[in-house]
Amino acid sequence: MSATLIPPPPPVPPGGPDDDPPRPPIDYSTAEGFSDAAGDSNWREWMMVGIGLVALLAILAIVFSLASIAQTTGSDSSTAAPAPAKPASAATAASVSTAAAPTLAQAKGIPYERFRPVDATVPAVPAGPVKKFTVSVIQHVVQVSPGLAPVEAWTYTVNGVAYRGTAASPPMVVNQGDRVQVTFVNGTSKDGVDMAHSIDIHAAEIAPNLNYIDVAPGHKKVITFTAKYAGVFMYHCATQPVLMHTGAGMTGMFLVKPRNLPPAAKELWLVQGEYYIGKPGGLADQAKMQAETPDVIAFNGYANQYKFAPITVPVGQTIRLYVLNAGPSKWSAFHVIGTLFDTVDQEGVISHGAQTVSLSPAQGAWMDLTLPQAGNYSFVTHAFGDMTKGAAGVLHTVGAPAVKVVPPVPAGGSTAPVLPHASMPMSATPAPAASSAPAGTIATTMGDMWVRTAGAAAKAGKVTFSVTNNGQMNHWLGIMRAPVAMSNGLLNSAAVLAKSAELGPGQSGTMAVTLTPGTYELVCLEPGHYNAGQHETFTVTN
């Protein structure tokens, strides 16, 4: 078969504006990758063969399907083969990810901070030509819902403001076009901070590899940028695993107010976040995070707090809401019952008369509304399954019937000590190293934040470690000579003699290394985990 040629249009006469020589005919067969007529013919023949084979396979599939249906319908269902059982590991993972959150009654004896309501009024923009924020970190044990056990939250403080007793972080507010300076200080031991953290500001247009870096406890990083675009942006910890850090509360709102924004009678900020409760007073549950099964979904770090104490707003005047979905995983369908949004600015897109604003994780919007009639207007996520987990509040207008204020304390009170400022160590009691390691290897177990071996010494030569991660976070075993080499407060990776694969929760691996006599340290290579205490001395003898 000859190639198909399409003649070109008539050439433009010489002297015209497009005085080019006539173009050759376009060979579409060649343009599609077939170089000549013979190749085109061969290709078509093989194509027909392929179509025939596909048709034959389809016919055979139909025949076998009909035979299977006939056999099934013609047999007694009681004799049908049972469905294959799920692997035990899959069943276990499913049960962990859907396990009910422990109750407050199960947290007997575990200290936690007393709940304090979060003021949802938007704070003022800092004075001065450069808007300066000092952002730090606290690790503290709090409740995120009245009847549930406390959980360790990792949250930010901004210019000395901290929302103790909740898992909320304060907003930072600037005007469009402002120059911004954020000094990120990764807490200290008195703040309970025992690992590396970072800050990623979505409003900034700067190189992440230079600015959103891991910072060891007590160290700092200064970030400067210009807030070019207006909007409701997210800031969060970008330290790996990001899911664990954001799921433990390390998120907040960075608000850039638009230029020439008309005034509002009331401005409020609301951050929707998810919380995953593990052991009472312990780390957030990473398995639940990965399965996207939060125990609590709340505004500003505590379930239903604005139902317990509704927010008072005016009647007949503009109310402006700044709303962020911090996730880390669930969508938000933000809705105020009994009204529509007059204006919505969602990620730079303006709309009017909206009933619901759909926000994916890390998206934000500001919206204006006016309540013409006195009343109590609930605000919720219209994903009602999430709303029932705590994502609801009330706007109470002046002149409306009083709402019965329900204090966020479960019936019967608490059996755990409630402290004004309390922090819990992130480590749990270490489990012994696994004893089922293969012969000739040293059983090594890692957890949050510890590492243990079945034997703390070995003979010089090749040594193989059998490693199991029993923690809820990723861990990564390495070995270094003691004292370990540090750089900017973190382990110097160039001094690591050997390392395992990075292990997720429940995973195992090995690490082999040839060692000479001396003192070494087994360390976790995840940023900041060494500083949190995840290391163990190991001796090599002759």
Image (cartoon, rainbow, N blue to C red):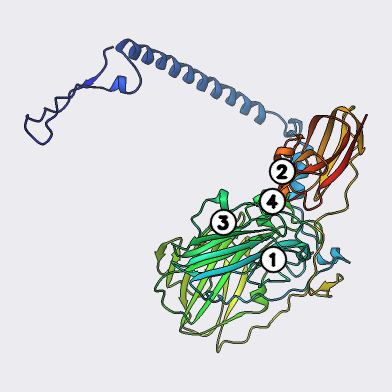
In which quadrant is the N terminus drawn? top left
Observer-nearest of 257 and 9 = 257
Residue 352 lies in quadrant: bottom left
Crowd around label 4: few <14 · some 14–19 · many ≥20 (10 Å): few
Observer-nearest of 415 and 19 = 19
> x, y (%) of residue 414?
84, 72
Q: CA distance from mark 2 to mark 1?
A: 33 Å
Residue holding disc 4: 488
> x, y (%) of residue 201?
55, 59
- Name the element at disc 1: loop
Do the residues bearing badges 1 and 4 touch, measured as CB atoms within 8 Å? Answer: no
Residue 31 lies in quadrant: top left
What amino acid does circle 3 point to?
Pro
> In the image, which is nearer the foreground, mark 2 or mark 1?
2
N-terminal-most mark, 3 or 2: 3
Residue holding disc 1: 167
Q: CA distance from mark 3 to mark 2?
A: 35 Å
Q: Residue furthest bottom?
A: 399
**371 over 436 or under it: above or below:** below
Residue holding disc 3: 361
> x, y (%) of residue 538?
88, 39
In which quadrant is the C terminus drawn? top right
> In the image, which is nearer the foreground, mark 3 or mark 4?
4
Q: Residue at x 17, y 26 (%)?
A: 8
Q: Residue at x 70, y 38 (%)?
A: 494
What amino acid does circle 1 point to?
Ala
N-terminal-most mark, 1 or 4: 1
